[in-house]
Structures are given as C-alpha cells and as structure tokens.
Image (tube, rainbow, N blue to C red):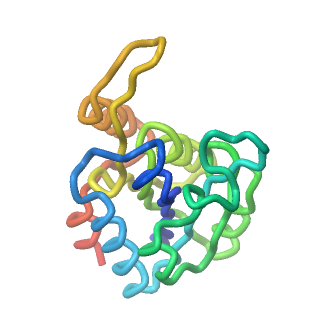
C-alpha cells in the first residue's frame, strides 16, 4: 500500500469566516497531527485550497483573508499544493496525474467540509480506482439549514460517514490511521 494524505480546504473561511466548522471538537488539531504523522513516515501530503475568481464571490474569494490557508496548515510541509474551484479535488487539477506518477494507490482524506469537498473527493478517488481512508475525526462540518430542511452538524457528520463506509471509503479515526505506520 502506498498512500498520500489529502488535506482539503483548511482555510480561514472555516474559522473566522462565514462557515465556522463546529463538529467534531478538536478537528484542526487532528488534521495537523495527521500532517505531522504523514511527514514523519514519508507519506506525501497534498494540500488543497478552494477558491473563486468571481468578482462578487461570497465565499473563498481568491486573495481574501477567508481564502487563505489556516496559518498552522500553511506553515507545515506539503509535497503538493493544489487550487480548485469545484468541490472535487480531482476536478480541474493535476491530482490524479501526480498521485499516479508516485504510484499512490490509497488516499487518506482530511479537512473540510465532510459533506461537501471531502465527500466529493473521496467519491472521485474511488471512481478512479484508489482505496480511500476517510478520517472521521479529522474532517469537520457545521449545522445546515436550507430549503431542503435542517440538520445538526453531528447528524450531518454521522450521515456522511455512514454513507462513505457503505462502499466508498474505510472510515477510521486518526488514532487507528496513525497505528498503521
């Protein structure tokens, strides 16, 4: 097994912007531990950053404070930094080519939001033939309310993790993942 850690969208928008991540507690610290563990075991780390080039973008406007990587992620080692404009980290990027050039067969998903970019990226990876490890406590989400209804962050996290475990990903916690090295 040759894995890579994909750290998705750990940006200021999720800390002091319009989309504060609330669940699970300690999510950022576990993402940072995953990055440090990967580095210590020579596992490539891919940092993905979501951005919009639209002039009136309400979220993740390129160049804004909210768009910037969280300072603790920005200062850590990464082997690849990708920018994307859509939820999937494979869409419009060279991620697949980069992973294949390194003979990676397993991707580990960490970051935000569990129900959007992490979920989409995991599905894209599975469709491309990668095994997927989805870090249940190193991904995070928030409560949602829209025209379809409302859901708590805890319910949303649990629902996405259950759906991921069905046939897309192996859903594990950080400690289990770290124990594999």
Q: Nearer the viewer, residue 87 or 121?
A: 87
Q: Does residue 32 appear to the left or right of 80 in the view shown? A: left
In the rendered image, the vertical position of residue 180 relative to residue 154, given as above or below: below
In the rendered image, the vertical position of residue 177 relative to residue 169, given as above or below: below
Question: What residue appears at the point 50 percent right and 59 percent down from the top-left corner?
Answer: 11
Question: What residue appears at the point 46 percent right and 85 percent down from the top-left corner?
Answer: 42
**Residue 33 at x, y percent in the picture:** 31, 74
| Quarter containing the N terminus | bottom left
Q: Does residue 49 appear to the left or right of 163 in the view shown? A: right
In the rendered image, the vertical position of residue 138 relative to residue 151, given as above or below: below
Question: What residue appears at the point 24 percent right and 57 percent down from the top-left corner?
Answer: 173
**Residue 88 at x, y percent in the picture:** 62, 46
Q: Does residue 85 appear to the left or right of 130 in the view shown? A: right
Say which quarter of the image contains residue 101.
Answer: bottom right
Question: What residue appears at the point 43 percent right and 56 percent down from the top-left corner?
Answer: 111
**Residue 127 at x, y percent in the picture:** 60, 43
| Quarter containing the C terminus | bottom left
**Residue 62 at x, y percent in the picture:** 70, 56
Q: Nearer the viewer, residue 8 or 145?
A: 145
Say which quarter of the image contains residue 176.
Answer: bottom left
């Amino acid at each position: 097994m040759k894995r890579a850690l994909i750290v998705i969208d750990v940006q200021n928008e999720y800390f002091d912007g319009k989309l504060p991540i609330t669940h699970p507690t300690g999510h950022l610290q576990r993402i940072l531990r995953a990055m440090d563990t990967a580095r210590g075991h020579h596992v490539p780390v891919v940092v993905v950053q979501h951005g919009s080039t639209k002039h009136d973008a309400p979220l993740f406007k390129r160049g804004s404070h909210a768009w910037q990587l969280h300072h603790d992620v920005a200062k850590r080692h990464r082997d690849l930094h990708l920018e994307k404009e859509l939820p999937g980290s494979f869409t419009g990027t060279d991620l697949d080519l980069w992973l294949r050039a390194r003979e990676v067969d397993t991707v580990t998903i960490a970051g935000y939001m569990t129900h959007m970019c992490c979920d989409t990226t995991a599905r894209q990876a599975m469709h491309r033939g990668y095994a997927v490890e989805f870090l249940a406590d190193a991904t995070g989400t928030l409560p949602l309310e829209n025209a379809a209804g409302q859901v708590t962050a805890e319910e949303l996290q649990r629902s996405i993790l259950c759906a991921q475990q069905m046939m897309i990903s192996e859903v594990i916690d950080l400690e289990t993942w770290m124990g594999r090295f």
